């Protein structure tokens, strides 16, 4: 049974599309393994769509732009789209193989596995390129009877267990467990059978505030 | 359609609650359509590539998407891009819409939020990546487009095939009774294979609906 879930605030920010890519990947991957959170997300999605579509602010100018766009769609674009069969959307990968073990990975990760594994001893890491300055997202594999030396976190550390098991001073964990630890925690995860995790190491606050609240992306571009 | 009634009633209730909670006033709009009308239009687009239905969906959602884009993207040009990107996907992804799983407005919202996410990343990181639909699938059972294993049907379900609408019945019978491939059916009926898939999906979902109703 999954014992650790993302909290309500993270789920709501995820549905709003306001979390950084690294964190939304984690929530989506957790929900693929956790039907409870998937149901919560479905309900939040319904509520968010009701709220988003409640009000229409329109002006004569917007109305004109809209009817121009519709005319273009109706006269050519829709037919072009139906006749265009060349577009192949990237499928990405649905599994990773490390040290002879193959793991199925969640859908949210399928376009993200673009780098080789790197590692020392029983610990291997595959860095993801999410384009975020602060967050560092990776797939982490620990081979059977491996461990990560005791460490503290400068910021928040997220570990989403995707396969296998591991345990630390606090608990033992199962696939799907979503473990968010702040800088006050020290731990040294160990595994007996081996495990595959998705991890993010990050500065504090970045995750839980929603990135558009912290920095206006357009503002960042202009100023 | 009977099997989506309870969900529709629930949506109405939620909408009233939302208006009260936010104290927002809904601006009346001659293009406003109810959930059943939207669902019908969406199915026309999926099954018959009906442009007139698409135009009604556009008139219902276009200005709403534009409003959302203005709040989120802070730039009029980008908001119009969001309308364009969202509505063209409503057209090209129509076969993924499943009336038993979500209201049309929820589905369109999902497309819009995903596009908005990708557009914000483009602005921030200058990256042409498109990850939104991987993170928030447009269809919750995933990979409806290319997963043939999805289409499984038991003998009990087949008893209800005659209760299906004709266009869906034709496809379900072709696949399961005459053992034609989806491509063969597409060629025979002179329709795109996407339409075969969407009719098959709608038909199977409806059959499952019959089952839930009669055997619960
Ligand atoms: Zn959960």
Image: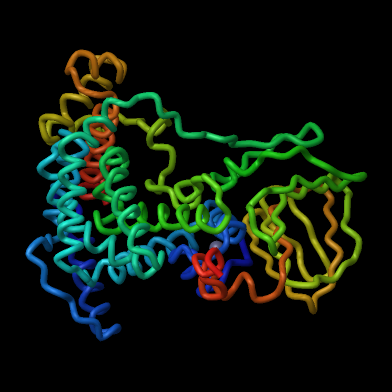
- Front position in the image: A19 or B150: A19
| Residue visible at 11% across and 35% down in the picture | B165
| Residue visible at 36% across and 52% down in the picture | B111
Give the vertical position of B188 relative to A58 (above or below).
above
State the image coordinates of residue B123 (x, y, percent, origin top left): 50, 56
| Residue visible at 36% across and 55% down in the picture | B110
Which image quarter has ligand 1? Answer: bottom right
- Front position in the image: B144 or B208: B144
Q: Residue furthest front?
A: A223
- A90 displayed left or right of B171: right
Q: Coloring scheme of the render?
A: rainbow
State the image coordinates of residue B2 (x, y, percent, origin top left): 14, 52
- A3 displayed left or right of B53: right
Tag count in the figure?
A: 0
- Front position in the image: B104 or B156: B104
- A193 displayed left or right of A197: right
| Residue visible at 79% across and 71% down in the picture | A170
Which image quadrant is residue B169 in?
Answer: top left
Which image quadrant is residue A205 in?
Answer: bottom right
State the image coordinates of residue B194 (x, y, percent, origin top left): 29, 29
Q: Residue furthest left?
A: B30
Give the vertical position of A108 relative to B27 (above or below).
above
- A121 displayed left or right of B17: right
State the image coordinates of residue A148 (x, y, percent, origin top left): 87, 57
């Amino acid at each position: 049974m999954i014992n650790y879930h993302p909290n309500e605030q993270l789920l709501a920010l995820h549905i709003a599309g306001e979390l950084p890519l690294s964190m939304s990947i984690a929530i989506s991957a957790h929900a693929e393994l956790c039907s409870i959170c998937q149901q919560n997300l479905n309900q939040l999605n319904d509520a968010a769509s009701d709220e988003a579509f409640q009000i229409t602010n329109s002006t004569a100018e917007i109305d004109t732009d809209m009817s121009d766009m519709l005319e273009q769609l109706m006269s050519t674009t829709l037919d072009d789209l139906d006749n265009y069969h060349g577009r192949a959307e990237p499928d990405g990968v649905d599994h990773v193989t490390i040290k002879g073990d193959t793991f199925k990975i969640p859908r949210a990760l399928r376009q993200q596995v673009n780098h080789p594994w790197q590692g020392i001893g029983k610990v291997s890491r595959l860095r993801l390129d999410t384009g975020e300055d602060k967050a560092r997202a990776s797939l982490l594999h620990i081979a059977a009877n491996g461990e990560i030396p005791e460490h503290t976190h400068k910021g928040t550390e997220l570990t989403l267990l995707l396969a296998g098991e591991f345990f630390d001073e606090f608990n033992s964990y199962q696939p799907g467990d979503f473990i968010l630890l702040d800088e006050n925690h020290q731990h040294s995860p160990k595994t007996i059978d081996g495990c595959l995790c998705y991890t993010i190491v990050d500065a504090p606050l970045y995750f839980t505030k929603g990135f558009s609240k912290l920095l206006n992306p357009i503002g960042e571009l202009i100023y | 359609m009977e099997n989506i009634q309870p969900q529709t009633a629930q949506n109405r209730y939620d909408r009233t609650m939302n208006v009260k909670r936010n104290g927002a006033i809904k601006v009346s709009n001659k293009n406003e359509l109810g959930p059943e009308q939207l669902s019908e239009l969406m199915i026309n687009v999926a099954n018959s590539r009906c442009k007139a239905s698409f135009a009604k969906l556009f008139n219902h959602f276009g200005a709403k998407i534009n409003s959302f884009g203005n709040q989120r993207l802070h730039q009029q040009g980008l908001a119009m891009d969001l309308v364009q990107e969202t509505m063209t996907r409503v057209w090209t992804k129509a076969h993924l819409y499943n009336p038993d799983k979500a209201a049309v407005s929820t589905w369109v919202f999902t497309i819009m939020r995903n596009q908005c996410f990708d557009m914000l990343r483009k602005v921030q990181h200058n990256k042409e990546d498109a990850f939104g639909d991987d993170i928030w699938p447009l269809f919750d059972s995933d990979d409806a487009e290319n997963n043939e294993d999805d289409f499984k049907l038991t003998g009990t379900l087949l008893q209800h095939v005659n209760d299906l609408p004709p266009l869906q019945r034709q496809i379900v019978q072709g696949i399961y009774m005459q053992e034609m491939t989806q491509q063969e059916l597409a060629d025979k009926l002179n329709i795109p294979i996407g339409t075969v898939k969407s009719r098959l999906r709608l038909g199977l979902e409806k059959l499952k609906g019959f089952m839930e109703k009669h055997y619960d």
